[in-house]
């Protein structure tokens, strides 16, 4: 009797691997050569510029002028404070440190798997943290008041992004429910609201906030507050669409089961539908947040000094006028944004995997 | 019967629904009314003009790029038109390049070539995870503005020149009789479209494949060529040439326009690349295997089997990317490319102070563009979806 044996698995050696993956056909070989050329043409000069030829030591632009073909890192090193705090009073920066530290710790706690008491920490982050952060950043209760004009750098970027996402979540949920409502007025108003904000560019919304909000309110409005309101309204429309996607993925049986148990509309939404829908939308909510974080850079157009705004200020500073200042600033700011956005997109991917494996079971 | 009537009328579902909606409507109207009253009061207090009369006033500023005749004595209405056209220009060029690059990147990600797939992946991860405004600044301030001056331009065969003032290209000038050429081109194109439709009809009715491409190409190329020969070649070019400190002749693509197009196209291409990859991967595996079993080459499989099916999944998200690109073109204001936001919601607003009217018009333009684009794409999408049998 012949015995069936599994086929032998042969691990390819490096030469076979190359032939298989890079040079399988003439066309493939050409592609490989083009790719190699692109890498040589982009990556090599970049590494040369950013590391090999770059100026590292020094405290003024003279150090950078000596190395004219490389990045001007002293510009970043000297101004790293501005990139984080903007023009926030130096003696009061510990307040910012506490807020940033608490934010980072809270987010880490919530995103790392298998941490205890996630629900409690999450509630704290949504209730206590915003209040404490507001008092610490703005001042009051014995702390010196720091006008928002002096905020800048990473704080502005994070304040706009985090407030935007936090404010847009409840509003977006209501709008998503409204859009799926059977009541014609509710549905119509929700659709009009969502499609209006999704149809116009953020920069016009920001222009509207700084130019028109004072007119509508009849009083002068803090410019940062105006921008925050604009960002919250704008991103709530996008959030509504994300949540609507989650709602649509809930099987009809869930609604019917909730109704059969005698739950009213709000009860069935809060206890049955939304917990499932929000869990499903979580990857897209993170994706939304990535988009919002990138979009916060637009506040530099209406005169805030966010991360990008600080880089722009630096490039027009005569003390740092070198051929490489602007590029160095952009590369640094780009790397900061990239690190934040890329890690979040990885997290969203990971969440998708967790959700998918939960479905498979 | 009496039991059902025992629910008092104010507690029935219907009454509650109506009451809730009436309350909501009253609330919204009240909010709008309060805001409007406030705005009227502030406007009167600050003596700001109202109404759309300002559109007929002289704007009095110059614009660096206009597709229609414009000068400092033109009106704000004209400024609006110039801005809209400049926005449309940058959006349409951007959409073409973003689509081409996006499809290359998307298909490249699925390439059997390890290096190409990784390179496309890296492209997407870098561009998608940094702000567009940053990329725009990079292209404008760090790349195009840092190019050498006119005297040290990079030239291609004395025809095109690139320097920090823009890209100088030969400028076409239509002479008398050029209309005839255009007419011939239009007639040829209509003929080619009719041919393609006819070939499709024949194929669907009989299964016979009639060659279309060579004849269609001939229809598009030959009539205009003959017409221009008849009219005595009515198209001339002016060539850019360095005179003194700058170039003269030809046409110039401003660095602002170039930076905006490059930034928008490369950024949006990273999203389109993901959409294309997902669309292709969404086509059932059996389709690929079946077409290989039928002996189609990899290229044929892609062109005839995979892409037509993938397009159905690709088009809806592609539409929203086109809309995003159009809306993102408003970042032009940051590098002073004269788009709608820059010249109208920027300069015109600060000169007239009529924020409400100007912002309303600006938003209305974008909303109209959004609605038109999605209407067109819905129509196209319906057409593609209908081919399913």
Image: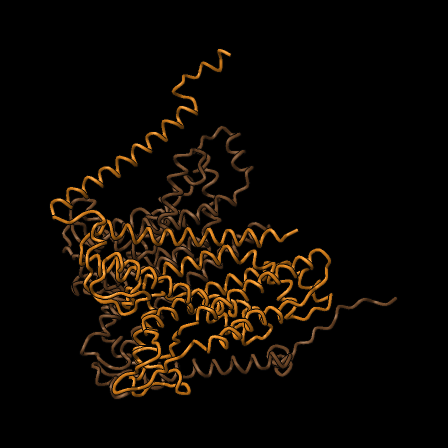
Pinpoint residue B227: horizontal percent, then vertical percent: 51, 73
Residue A125 seen in the figure: no
Is B246 placed above or below B317 here?
below
Chain seen in brown: A
Q: Residue at x 61, y 77 (%)?
A: A21
Residue A23 location, x and y as percent? Answer: 61, 81
Q: Relative to B199, does residue A248 appear above or below in the rendering?
A: above
Judging by colour alone, the chain drawn in orange in this rendered image is B
Is A50 left or right of B346, judged from the image as shown? right
x, y (%) of residue B358? 25, 53
Left or right relative to B30: residue A6? right
**Residue lying furthest top in this view?**
B2
Between A76 and A13, the residue placed more toward the observer is A76
User: Which color scheme did the rendering employ for the protein?
Assistant: by chain
Q: In front: A343, or B174?
A: B174
Figure quadrant of the N terminus of chain A = bottom right
Q: Residue at x 55, y 73 (%)?
A: B221
Q: How many marks?
A: 0
Relative placement, left or right, of A184 versus A24 is left
Quadrant of residue A44 within the rendered picture: bottom left
Where's residue B133, x and y in %?
A: 33, 66
Q: In this view of the protein, which residue sits in the foreground, A109 or A172?
A: A172
Q: Locate residue B284: give its quadrant.
A: bottom right
Which residue is depicted at the point 46% across and 58% down? Answer: A348
| Residue B303 seen in render | yes
């Amino acid at each position: 009797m012949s015995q069936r044996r599994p086929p032998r698995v042969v691990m390819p050696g490096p030469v076979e691997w190359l032939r298989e993956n890079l040079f399988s056909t003439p066309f493939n070989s050409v592609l490989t050569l083009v790719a190699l050329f692109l890498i040589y043409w982009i990556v090599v000069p970049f590494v040369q510029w950013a590391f090999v030829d770059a100026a590292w030591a020094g405290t003024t632009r003279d150090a950078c002028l000596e190395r004219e073909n490389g990045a001007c890192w002293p510009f970043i090193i000297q101004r790293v404070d501005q990139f984080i705090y903007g023009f926030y009073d130096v003696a009061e920066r510990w307040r910012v440190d506490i807020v940033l530290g608490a934010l980072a710790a809270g987010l880490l706690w919530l995103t790392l798997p298998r941490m205890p008491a996630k629900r409690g920490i999450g509630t704290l982050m949504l209730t206590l943290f915003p209040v404490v952060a507001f008092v610490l950043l703005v001042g009051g209760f014995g702390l010196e008041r720091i006008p928002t004009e002096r905020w800048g750098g990473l704080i502005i970027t994070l304040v706009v992004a985090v407030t935007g996402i936090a404010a847009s979540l409840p509003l977006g949920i209501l709008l998503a429910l409204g859009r799926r409502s059977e009541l014609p007025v509710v549905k119509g108003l929700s659709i009009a609201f969502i499609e209006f904000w999704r149809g116009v560019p953020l920069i016009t919304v920001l222009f509207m906030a700084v130019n028109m909000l004072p007119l509508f309110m009849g009083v002068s409005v803090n410019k940062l507050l105006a921008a925050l309101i604009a960002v919250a309204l704008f991103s709530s429309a996008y959030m509504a669409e994300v949540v609507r996607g989650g709602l649509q993925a809930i099987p009809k049986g869930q609604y019917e089961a909730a109704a059969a148990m005698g739950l009213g509309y709000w009860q069935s939404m809060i206890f049955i539908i939304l917990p499932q829908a929000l869990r499903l939308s979580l990857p897209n909510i993170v994706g939304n947040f990535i988009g919002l974080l990138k979009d916060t850079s637009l506040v530099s157009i209406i005169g805030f000094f966010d991360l990008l705004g600080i880089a722009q200020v630096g490039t027009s500073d005569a003390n740092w006028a070198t051929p490489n200042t602007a590029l160095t600033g952009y590369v640094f700011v780009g790397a900061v944004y990239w690190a934040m956005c890329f890690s979040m997109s990885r997290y969203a991917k990971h969440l998708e995997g967790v959700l998918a494996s939960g479905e498979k079971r | 019967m009496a039991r059902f009537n025992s629910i008092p009328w104010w507690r029935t579902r219907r009454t509650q629904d109506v009451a809730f909606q009436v309350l909501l409507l009253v609330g919204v109207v009240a909010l709008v009314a309060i805001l409007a009253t406030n705005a009227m009061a502030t406007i009167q207090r600050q003596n700001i003009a109202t109404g759309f009369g300002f559109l007929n006033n002289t704007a009095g500023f110059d614009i660096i790029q206009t597709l229609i005749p414009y000068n400092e004595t033109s009106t704000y209405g004209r400024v609006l038109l110039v801005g809209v056209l400049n926005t449309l220009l940058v959006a349409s060029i951007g959409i073409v390049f973003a689509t081409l690059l996006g499809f290359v990147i998307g298909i490249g990600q699925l390439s059997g070539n390890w290096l190409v797939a990784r390179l496309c992946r890296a492209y997407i991860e870098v561009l998608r995870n940094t702000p567009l405004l940053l990329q725009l600044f990079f292209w404008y301030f760090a790349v195009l503005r840092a190019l050498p001056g006119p005297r040290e331009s990079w030239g291609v065969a004395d025809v095109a020149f690139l320097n920090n003032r823009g890209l100088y290209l030969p400028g076409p000038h239509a002479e008398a009789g050029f209309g005839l050429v255009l007419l011939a081109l239009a007639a040829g194109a209509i003929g080619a479209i009719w041919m393609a439709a006819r070939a499709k009809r024949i194929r669907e009715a009989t299964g016979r494949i009639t060659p279309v491409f060579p004849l269609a190409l001939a229809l598009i190329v030959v009539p205009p060529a003959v017409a221009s020969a008849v009219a005595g070649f009515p198209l001339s070019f002016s060539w850019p040439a360095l005179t003194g400190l700058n170039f003269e002749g030809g046409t110039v693509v401003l660095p602002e326009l170039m930076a905006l197009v490059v930034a928008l196209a490369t950024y949006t291409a990273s999203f389109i690349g993901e959409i294309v990859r997902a669309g292709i991967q969404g086509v059932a595996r059996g389709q690929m295997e079946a077409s290989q079993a039928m002996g189609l080459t990899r290229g044929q499989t892609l062109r005839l089997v995979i892409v037509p099916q993938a397009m159905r999944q690709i088009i809806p998200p592609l539409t929203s990317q086109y809309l995003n690109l159009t809306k993102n073109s408003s970042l032009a204001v940051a590098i002073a490319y004269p788009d709608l936001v820059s010249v109208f919601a920027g300069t015109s607003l600060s000169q007239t102070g009529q924020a409400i009217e100007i912002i309303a018009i600006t938003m209305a333009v974008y909303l109209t563009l959004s609605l038109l684009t999605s209407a067109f794409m819905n129509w196209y999408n319906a057409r593609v979806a209908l081919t399913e049998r």
